[in-house]
Image: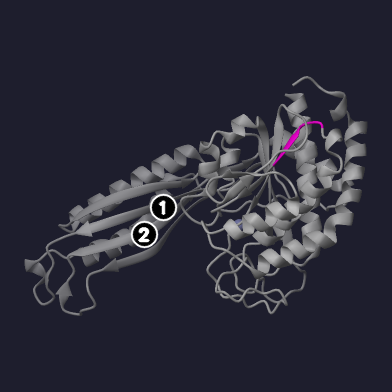
């Protein structure tokens, strides 16, 4: 796209001022949206009532996408910046004591209620200045961020991002790893690739008194579980993060005198480098099958790729940082973690930025983090996340016009 007069700094600054003024006016309504979606949470795949509520609040024509998701469009034809909010809740019994706490055994414990309310505020404000938007603005209400099959996979497979010529994706996520109200947007990898694996062991079993006559998968399971930690140390340069966690192991029935016939290990692998990912997966296979062999039993390994690495685009981060400062949002040190978010399916194919918005209060006893039944980001973060989204859009418009 040729540089347009609408992306010159003066025009963008004027747009930013008008947008923030409209945002401020709309924040009380956005707080109500936050409280309503928080009080009525819906699990992955069941977000229909949430999508309906948000579509009404946005007062924008939205199309269905990825099952219960919705996608819309504002501004001119041509390239667009997508702003994404996730809609699903978690199966937790809320313990926040908030007046709008959920009572259904589901809970917005990942801050998605804040992200959704912020996106509503941004879109409602943008509608009042649509003629001044330099590039398209595509709001996405995404389902199933928390569980497989991930909503982002269906969104990318739908062809709609190409239809809307989405050239930049912007996401924001509250996070207890960042000080309250600050925003971390480091360039490069911010979340790991996440893969899962299962190792299934088989042997003949036998009597606990006569192990020499049978085949015992128990020792193979235990030895493999410990050996897997060595795999990381022997395969990956310690200067690059890699985590392999065994989350489950089991073998046989609950009996003290039976050699089990079958056993199972479930694990997660987190990497930040594609070669490491392939090398560790191969090493898991070798270790499990050879350890089983050494114990006279058989092992099969099944590896399921889950999510690619989430990387923030350098140019986008470069443009976004000064906008955040202008919007009065303090920029924190980059936050990188071995966590994962299906936003990585967008960053895998488009310049993208995931901004982490802090919830950690200084001096607080113990940090209440994501997926905790006591997690309740303060109301003011709806406005902060909204400003982050506006900054991301303005930076995205610049990246699209540079390109
Ligand atoms: Zn989340």
Q: Which residues are magenta?
A: 134-138
Look at the picture and state if 189 lies above or below 360.
Answer: above
Residue 394 is drawn in which quadrant? top right
- Residue at the image position 24 percent from the left and 61 percent from the top: 220
The circle on residue 196 is 1
Task: Indicate the position of residue 96 as horizontal and vertical percent values.
Answer: 67, 76
Q: Are marks 2 and 1 in contact (CB under 8 Å)?
A: yes
Task: Indicate the position of residue 209 as horizontal and vertical percent values.
Answer: 10, 77
Quick one: which residue is furthest to the left in this view? 213
Residue 207 is drawn in which quadrant? bottom left
Magenta span has 42? no
User: Which SS class for mark 2?
Assistant: strand
Query: Residue 327, can we see it?
Result: no
Of residues 4 and 352, the one drawn nearer to the viewer in this rendering: 4
| Quadrant hosting ligand 1 | bottom right
Task: Indicate the position of residue 153 as horizontal and vertical percent values.
Answer: 51, 43
- Residue at the image position 57 percent from the left and 52 percent from the top: 143
The alpha-carbon separation of the residues under discs 2 and 1 comes to 7 Å
Of residues 242 and 117, the one drawn nearer to the viewer in this rendering: 117
| Image quarter hosting the C terminus | top right
Model colouring: one colour
Residue identified by numbered label 2: 266
Compare marks 2 and 1 and give the one earlier in the sequence. 1
- Residue at the image position 73 percent from the left and 57 percent from the top: 117
- Tell me if the residue at label 2 has its CB under 8 Å from ligand 1: no
User: Which SS class for mark 1?
Assistant: strand
How many numbered discs, if any?
2
Of residues 398 and 266, the one drawn nearer to the viewer in this rendering: 398
Secondary structure of the magenta portion, mostly? strand
Task: Indicate the position of residue 213 as horizontal and vertical percent values.
Answer: 6, 67
């Amino acid at each position: 796209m040729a540089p347009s007069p609408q992306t010159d700094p003066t025009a963008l600054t004027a747009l930013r001022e008008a947008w923030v003024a409209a945002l401020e006016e709309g924040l009380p309504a956005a707080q109500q949206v936050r409280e309503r979606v928080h009080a009525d949470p819906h699990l992955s795949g069941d977000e229909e009532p949430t999508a309906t509520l948000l579509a009404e609040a946005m007062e924008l024509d939205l199309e269905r996408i990825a099952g219960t998701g919705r996608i819309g469009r504002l501004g001119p034809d041509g390239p667009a910046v997508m702003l994404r909010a996730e809609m699903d809740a978690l199966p937790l019994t809320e313990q926040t004591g908030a007046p709008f706490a959920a009572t259904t055994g589901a809970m917005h414990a990942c801050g998605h209620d804040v992200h959704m309310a912020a996106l509503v505020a941004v879109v409602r404000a943008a509608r009042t200045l649509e003629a001044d938007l330099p590039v398209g603005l595509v709001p996405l209400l995404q389902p199933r961020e928390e569980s497989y099959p991930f909503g982002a996979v269906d969104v990318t497979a739908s062809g709609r991002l190409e239809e809307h010529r989405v050239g930049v994706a912007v996401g924001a996520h509250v996070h207890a790893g960042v000080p309250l109200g600050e925003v971390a947007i480091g360039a490069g990898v911010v979340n790991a690739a996440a893969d899962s694996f299962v190792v299934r062991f088989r042997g003949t079993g036998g009597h606990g008194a006569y192990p020499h006559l049978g085949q015992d998968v128990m020792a193979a399971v235990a030895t493999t579980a410990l050996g897997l930690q060595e795999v990381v140390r022997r395969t990956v340069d310690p200067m690059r993060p890699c985590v392999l966690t065994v989350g489950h192991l089991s073998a046989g029935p609950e009996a003290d005198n039976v050699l089990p016939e079958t056993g199972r290990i479930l694990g997660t692998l987190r990497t930040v480098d594609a070669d490491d990912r392939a090398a560790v997966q191969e090493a898991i296979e070798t270790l499990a099958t050879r350890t089983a062999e050494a114990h006279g039993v058989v092992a099969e390994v099944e590896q399921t790729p889950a999510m690619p690495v989430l990387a923030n685009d350098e140019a986008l981060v470069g443009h976004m940082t000064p906008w955040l400062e202008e919007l009065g949002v303090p920029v924190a040190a980059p936050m990188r973690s071995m966590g994962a978010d299906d936003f990585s399916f967008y960053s895998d194919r488009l310049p993208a930025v995931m901004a982490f918005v802090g919830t950690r209060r200084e001096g607080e006893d113990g940090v209440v983090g994501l997926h905790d039944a006591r997690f309740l980001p303060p109301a003011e973060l709806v406005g902060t996340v909204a400003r982050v989204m506006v900054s991301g859009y303005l930076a995205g418009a610049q990246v699209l016009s540079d390109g």
